[in-house]
Amino acid sequence: MSLLELHQVSKTYGAGPSEVHAVADIDLEVDRGSLIAIMGPSGSGKSTLLTISGSLEEPTSGEVLIDGDSLQKMSRNDKARLRRRTIGYVFQEFNLLAGLTALENVSLPLELDGVSAKKARLAGIAVLEDLGLADRATRYPDQLSGGERQRVAIARAVIGGRHLLLADEPSGALDQANGEAVMRMLLSACKKGVAAVVVTHDAQLASWADRVVFLRDGRIVDQTVPPPSAESLVQNVPQP
Ligand code: ADP
Ligand code: MG
């Protein structure tokens, strides 16, 4: 069973002449341990696909299953619990709270879920350490570089052992080195059993994924298993 399943998911905004089919007839399955990259031009429905998968928005039709449970059949409370415990969302603009330190930002989801402040703090420190940010724990977002803010946003998304990681262009504002660091973090989360979906414009970064899904006008036009990396091709060349 896949952790995330979309069956014939469509989302229409507006009505009549202003009607927009943001996504249409999407079928997608994401297994535990796998990283899926989504690519497509601006306006092709990438963010809509992600917000529907994260239960932040309802589809007009179709079904979304997380860990086998249909979102449509869940109460608002069930969905809120799912967003607190199972789904980690990395927003395009990071959305860190300016008045909280890196550690406070990261441990906030656990505190909101009723975990004691002390336990939440310890878990926050552990995640920041994992992401190489232990020495930035007491800094505020405006005292961090773009790459560091992005890592804090990822730490906040993975804390508490969430199983589904959804990231909307997390490398958008980053240079190549930081973009690769973000992909490495997502991959290492996947190695621990997380299912991840990442929207990216960068074909190089997308090639790190297990599968690349291309969207055009709200529809999946191609799903590609990436070719072996340049490195592995070089390694396979017989030595003279
Ligand atoms: P992407 O992330 O690929 O740029 P989006 O998912 O944001 O694309 O948008 C897909 C389409 O749906 C676009 O045409 C966009 O204008 C439209 N759309 C997205 N959100 C809304 C909304 N809240 N109301 C109306 N139209 C929207
Ligand atoms: Mg978008």
Image (cartoon, rainbow, N blue to C red):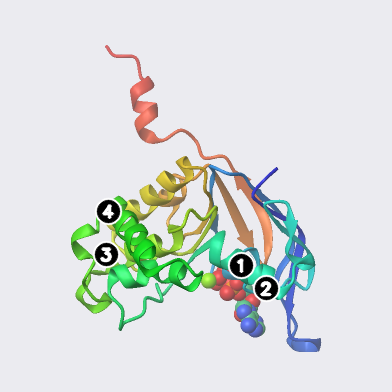
Name the residue nearer the viewer: 82 or 207.
82
Q: Quadrant of the C terminus?
A: top left
SS for callout 4: helix
Name the residue nearer the viewer: 12 or 87.
87
Q: Mark 1 points at which residue?
A: 81
Quote the CA–CA distance across marks 3 and 4.
Answer: 12 Å
Would residue 221 be found to the left or right of residue 142 on screen? right
SS for callout 2: helix
Of badges 2 and 3, the one in the foreground is 2
- Residue 127 is situated, as x and y percent measured from the top left of the image, at 34, 55
Residue 77: give its label.
Answer: 2
Going 75% across and 83% down the picture, which residue do you hit? 19
In the image, what residue type sits under mark 4? Glu
Residue 148: give its label.
Answer: 3
In the image, what residue type sits under mark 2? Asn
Would residue 153 be found to the left or right of residue 145 on screen? right
Residue 129: give its label.
Answer: 4
Q: Are marks 1 and 2 in contact (CB under 8 Å)?
A: yes
